[in-house]
Image (cartoon, coloured by chain):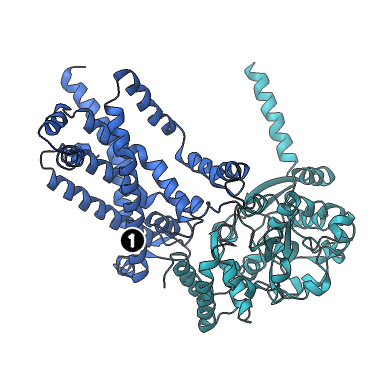
Amino acid sequence: MNDRQFRFFTLSISWTWLTVFALVPTLMVIITSFLETNTTQNITAHFTLENYAELVDVAYLKIFLRSLLIAGSCTLLCLIVSYPFAYGISHSSLRYRSILLLLVIIPFWTSSLIRTYAIMTILKTKGIINTILLSLGIIHQPLQLLYTNIALFIGLTYTLLPFMLLPLYANMEKMDLTLIDAARDLGASKLTVLRKILIPITMPGILAGSMMVFLPAMTLFYIPNLLGGAKSMLLGNLIQEQFLSANNWPLGAASSVLLIIFMLLLAHWYWQRNPDSDRTELL
Amino acid sequence: MKRIFLLFSLFFCAFALADTKVVNVYNWSDFLPPHLIKQFEKETGITVNYAEFDNNETLYTKIKHSKHGDYDIITPSSYMVDRMRQEGLLHPIDKTLLTNWHHLDSFFLNRDYDPDNKYSVPYLWSSTGIAVNTLYHNPKEITKFADLWQPQYHHQLLALDDLRDCFTIALLKLGDDINSVNPDTIKEAYRALIDLMPNIRVFNSSAVANMFIDEDITVGFAWGGDTFLASRENPHITFIYPQEGFQISLDCLVIPTNAQHVKEAHQFINFLLRPEIISQIPPRIGYATPNKTANLSLPADLRHNPIINPSPQVLKRAKFQRDLGTANRIYERYWERLKIGAD
């Protein structure tokens, strides 16, 4: 096999992969979103814009806004927790750094669904937190933590934290520490250093991390279902509900398409802001 | 070696051809302990092919699209019997083949969903009532579904993640027919459910027993079967039959029109009508049986258990589900709006 053949061979593998598992499914979703729904079969081959018209509704707008709010707060929470954490890791001695990173990554080896069930056993009425607090005499009535918005935030933040942490870490590791010393020498306060040096330099990391947390936070449907009591519906739950219980595939597909468009707009905005960033960074 | 193998396979083929007595059963999950299936096979020499489903809509789609008669016995709930009967999907039951028919409680027979039980044989039932943990709530304060609307239950209730169950409690609270197809009535029930939303903490129907056992949920509307199982693990849990009435979900044995083994299917149904057979199921899954004789033969603690064997006065308040026809679509619309938290 000569060099050209080898190139052709490897490229064709990735092209086939992308076509079969990314392009075709996405096209199927887009096509379904323009078809009519039917009670006995799931879809009928008949073109309509009805599904998109149906989504222009106060109720769906509310879900979208609620998803934005919850995903936004979750992103902010992740950022606040990860920022000092990432800074700490990237400036710890080399020996500890790999151990710390490993500790961040190890939970990834377990399915996030299983980790969500684990969170349930921590938050339950007879769970770990309540048992400890009760036995220490700090509370006298078990706290109702499970099936609340607090549980939802804990679940989302815990699951998505590494997606914020790792881009931030990658960004901070490359940073030149002498810049901070220079700023301090020139009389900048700690706050000014953070505002004028640290944040601007790490902005690409902050943005990349935020995108990686924000989008999944809107669509991880099993976390609102299991921890939020299936009451606080997010965009992901809406799509899941349309496909699995309401049996309205076209409407579910239309919601997915809107989500994809929203995601592309966000990515576009990011690239505009960072024209020199590598476009593959987000993908 | 090859020849021996061929001989063996021929032998087994002949064996399989000689034994053509088969019955294909499609039942709810957990509804029939395997040892009873074995007992039936042993007694009759009929091989049982057994498969399970977990909701009526799945069952309906399968039956509607099965052209070759894949199943001989299925177990839809009463409203689905109603729909299947009207669509001509069911084979009439020949009661002369069912020598154990007389064991059935007449209360469960000849109901609107299937007059004269032309197509269906009552199998097992459960009701939707209120489950309460007495450590947290005074059960005397909860006597009807309307009590669940009180502000003291803010963010506490379990609501079954099931369209019919949710609308039924709202319709009963309003004093309406649980099978109403009137759009105005349905809308009123939807409004009532919106008022109930602040009190609802969880929508769930698959892990109900565990939520009550672990006290993650202490009050809510629940199925009798789940409450029975939960009360065995956590003695503080009781079940309340609300005063307004309550919905019974009655699962029936029926034979699809295109069944291939009608005679064997009748034998199977007759087997399940035998008191000493059917009485083994309630203690395992908490569902009650419409078999009068079987109920009398239950051990004393179960015979007096109000979930497994409610008194006739209580039972009088029971309502049976019927098919809603085209009104299904209206209910579904409102249900969707309720779940996405519209209005």
Residue at (51%, 84%) from the top-left corner? B184
Picture coordinates of residue A60 (x, y %)?
Answer: 35, 66
Whether residue B343 is visible, yes or no, is yes
- Tell which chain the image draws in cyan: B
Bin the neighbour count of mark 1 within 10 Å (Cα to Cα): few under 14, some 14-19, many 20 and up. Answer: some
Horizontal relation, residue A36 to residue B154: left or right:
left
The residue at which mark 1 appears reads as A64
Which of the 4 image quarters holds residue B316? bottom right
Residue B114 or residue A111, whichever sits in front? A111
Picture coordinates of residue A25 (x, y %)?
Answer: 33, 47
> Which quadrant would the C terminus of chain B be assigned to in this image?
bottom left
Residue A141 or residue B321, whichever sits in front? A141
Residue at (22%, 33%) from the top-left corner? A171
- Does residue A113 sit above or below B304 in this rendering? above
Element type where label 1 sits in the image: helix
Horizontal relation, residue B291 to residue B131: left or right:
right
Picture coordinates of residue B164 (x, y %)?
Answer: 58, 68
Residue at (32%, 69%) from the top-left corner? A50
Whether residue B326 is visible, yes or no, is no
Count of numbered marks:
1
Which of the 4 image quarters holds residue B68? bottom right
Picture coordinates of residue A279 (x, y %)?
Answer: 17, 39
> Which quadrant would the N terminus of chain B be assigned to in this image?
top right
Horizontal relation, residue A97 to residue B182: left or right:
left
- Tell which chain the image draws in blue: A
